[in-house]
């Protein structure tokens, strides 16, 4: 790495924004392309980053397993696993995958070419998570970061404290099911692991849409404890139980099987009370799989780039804050990455 923020502006002409997404020009490969391409590097398995159909897909083994589970044969023509820390060269660009701490298999993609190092974070968080490898800061010339929660108001509380709220409610209302809306990949398994860490050893009931990915996590060595299908349980058995389901299912007739449910949701967006009210959430749990505002700023300091590019989220606030540190910054405004399923 030859350039620093204390010297010249780093040369990054070998990266370009195209309708398909972020292109690494010498390698002819897109990072998290927005549609099928010839060559793709994928940071993690969420559907807005891991789209099916590309001819060649490079990702961690865990991410490729997730893509196979979700897309089957349509996951990609040739799936090329990268080991953690392994470096490969493509078109003169050295490519390395380093942990991002977002979900199982999630990676930052480190790109080195012409004396410049670029780190594309994908989605990430820096809070410890027992279900995936923790985020590793990588010093770089250019940091390409998300900003899903890129506003000063977003400061995530300790997840253990949010889980304690759920367990307290369970003790207060033992006759009611506690139905928690969770995203199928990452949030579901993390909440289960947090409950187990808090000493909750009873069976946790799952909506059918969550079963396959929980089984995949177990296959990759993430112990989740006793899990049961909610659809097979008698209504009386669900009284005083924790039931996990996609948020959409809790507004559907599926939820009618639950006895007087306490409707909860585990998301960083539960910090915004209006969102919780709009969704009929009685028990908001602020548990996020994305970096909050202090973590975003800490990542900029720890990686010490000369320039920061913001791919998606609350770009303007983060760009402004980065410029206040004397670094260059700009928003890429890539369309197609979602923050709602958080």
Image (tube, grey):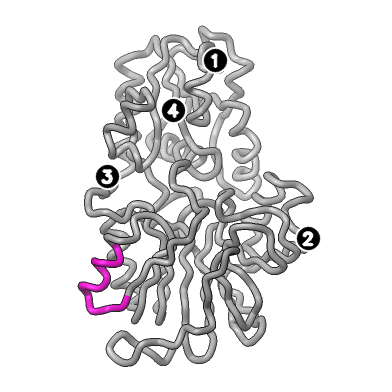
Marks 3/1: CA–CA distance: 32 Å
- Return the mark for residue 77: 2
Spatial separation of the CA atoms under disc 4 and disc 3: 18 Å
Q: Under tag 2, what secondary structure?
A: loop
Residue underneath mark 3: 157
Check the image and name the residue furthest to the left. Answer: 324
Is label 3 in contact with label 1 (beta carbons under 8 Å)? no
Question: Dividing the picture into quarters, in which one does residue 160 lie?
Answer: top left
**Residue ID at (66%, 60%):** 61
In this rendering, which labeled residue sits more in front, label 3 or label 1?
1
Question: Which portion, as a residue range, is magenta?
Answer: 318-328
Residue at the disc numbered 4: 180
In depth, the one of 130 and 209 nearer the eye is: 209
Disc with the residue nearer the chain's start (4 vs 1): 4
Q: Quarter holding the C terminus?
A: top left
Look at mark 1 in the image and give the residue it sits on: 253
């Amino acid at each position: 790495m030859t350039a620093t923020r204390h010297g010249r502006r780093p040369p990054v002409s070998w990266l370009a924004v195209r309708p398909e997404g972020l292109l690494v020009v010498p390698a002819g490969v897109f990072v998290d392309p927005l549609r099928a391409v010839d060559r793709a590097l994928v940071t993690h398995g969420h559907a807005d980053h891991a789209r099916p159909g590309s001819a060649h897909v490079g990702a961690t083994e865990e991410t490729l397993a997730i893509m196979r589970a979700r897309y089957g044969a349509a996951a990609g023509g040739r799936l090329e696993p990268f080991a953690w820390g392994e470096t490969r060269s493509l078109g003169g660009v050295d490519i390395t995958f380093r942990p991002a701490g977002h979900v199982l298999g999630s990676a930052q993609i480190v790109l080195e070419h012409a004396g410049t190092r670029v780190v594309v974070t994908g989605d990430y968080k820096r809070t410890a998570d027992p279900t995936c490898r923790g985020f590793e800061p990588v010093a770089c010339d250019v940091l390409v970061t998300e900003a899903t929660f890129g506003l000063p108001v977003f400061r995530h509380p300790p997840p253990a404290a949010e889980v304690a709220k759920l367990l307290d409610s369970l003790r207060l209302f033992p006759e009611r099911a506690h139905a928690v809306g969770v995203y199928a990949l990452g949030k579901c398994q993390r909440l289960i692991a947090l409950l187990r860490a808090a000493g909750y050893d009873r069976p946790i009931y799952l909506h059918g849409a969550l079963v396959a990915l929980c089984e995949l996590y177990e296959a990759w060595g993430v112990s989740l404890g006793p899990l049961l299908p909610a659809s097979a349980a008698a209504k009386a058995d669900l009284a005083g139980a924790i039931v996990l389901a996609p948020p959409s299912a809790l507004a559907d007739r599926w939820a009618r099987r639950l006895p007087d449910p306490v409707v909860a949701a585990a998301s960083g967006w539960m910090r915004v009370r209006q969102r919780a009210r709009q969704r009929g959430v009685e028990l908001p749990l602020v548990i996020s799989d994305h970096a909050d505002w202090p973590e975003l700023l800490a990542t900029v300091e720890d990686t010490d780039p000369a320039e920061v590019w913001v791919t998606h989220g609350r770009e303007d606030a983060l760009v402004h804050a980065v410029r206040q540190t004397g670094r260059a910054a700009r928003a890429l405004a890539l369309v197609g990455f979602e923050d709602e399923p958080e």
